[in-house]
Amino acid sequence: MDAGDGSPAASPLDAVAAAFKSRVVELQDLVLARSMFPATALPDLASVNASVTAMESRVQDIRRRLQEELDAIPKAKKLIELSLKQQEKLQHMLANVPSGMHEGVFATHLEQSSSRMLPDCFNYSSSVREHNECELKIKEEPVAAPKKGRAPAPRWYISTEELDSLSSYMRGRLTLEKVNIAINEVASYADANAHLVTCPKKKLSDDMWDKALELRDIAATEAVKGKPFFLEVDIKGPGLKLDNTGKAILTVLRHLGRIHETRIGHHRVFILSKQA
C-alpha cells in the first residue's frame, strides 16, 4: 500500500490501511531515535511489526470478503430477472388456460407455488371452481408419465390479444377456450407418441409395436428429430377433430407459430413449437 496515495478513487479501506502504515513507520522512527540501546529496542519493534502485519492481513481478508459479496451481486440480479420472467410466463398460462382445465391446473403443485405470487385477479375462489365443474371437461387420452429426462410436450396457450389480432375470416367463430383446449389435446398426442418411441417391445402389443416402429422412423428424420410431434391420424377429439372447426384451429395454430407442418411418407406430421 502506498501511504502517499491521495487519489479520490482510493477506497476507504485503502486510505485507512495507508494511514495506519504511515503512522506505524513514524512510531518506529521515533522509537529508534529515542532509544539509547537499539539492541534492546529491536525486539519491541519486531513485536510491533508482527502486530501490524497481522492487522494488515486482517484488512486484506475483509477486502477479499467484500469483493466476493460484490461479485455475487450480478448473479443475484440475474436470478431475480429470470424469476420475474418465469412469473410472467406462469401468469400468462394461468390467465389463458381454458375453463375446462381449471380444476386440473389448480390440483397441481404449480398452482400451490405460483398463485401466491399472482394478483388477486388470477386467484379463483372456491365458488368459481364449483361453477367450473359444470363447464366443459377435457377428456384426454390416457398418456404414460414422461420418462425421467424427457420433458413433456409444450403447451403454449394463446392469449386473448393473439386471438383478436387474427383477421375475422381466419378467426371465424373460434373462441380462446376452444383453441387452448385443442393445444392441450395435441400436446397429449405428442406425449403419447414420445412414449411409444421409447417404449420397449415387451411392453407393447403387436399392433402397437408396428405403430411404434413407424413413429421411430418419423422421429429419426431430420425435420422431426428431437422435437415433439403428432400425426394427422392421431386427431380423434373430443377437443380437436378433423372437421371444419378443427381445420380452422390448425390453421390458427400454424399462423401463430404453435405448430409447424411437414409431410413424411404418407403421413401429415405436425411439430409442436416451444415458447421462447
Image (cartoon, helix red, strand yellow):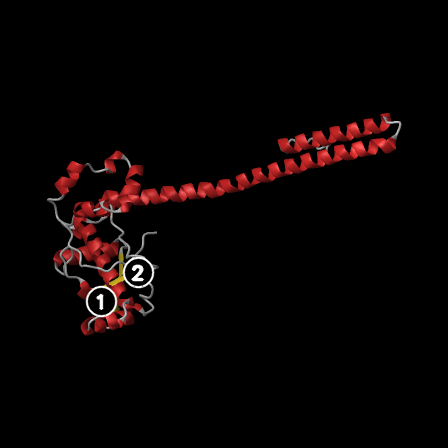
**Residue at (20% x, 70% y) in the render:** 208
Residue lying furthest left in this view?
134
**Residue at (64% x, 38% y) in the render:** 60
Residues packed near mark 1 inside 10 Å, few (<14), some (14 to 19) or many (20 plus): few
Q: Is residue 78 left or right of residue 50?
A: left
Residue 26 horizontal/vertical position (percent): 78, 28
Residue 211 horizontal/vertical position (percent): 22, 71
Q: Nearer the viewer, residue 213 or 145?
A: 145
Give the residue type that dot 2 points to.
Answer: Lys
**Residue at (47% x, 43% y) in the render:** 75
For marks 1 and 2, the one nearer the N-term is 2
In the structure shown, which secondary structural element does the residue marked by tag 1 occupy? strand
Mark 1 in CB contact with mark 2 (< 8 angstroms): no
**Residue at (31% x, 62% y) in the render:** 227
User: Badge 1 is on which residue?
Assistant: 268
Q: Is residue 181 left or right of residue 91?
A: left
The image quarter in which residue 198 lies: bottom left
User: Badge 2 is on which residue?
Assistant: 147
- Looking at the rendered image, the quarter that the N terminus falls into is top right
Residue 97 horizontal/vertical position (percent): 22, 46
The image quarter in which residue 219 lies: bottom left
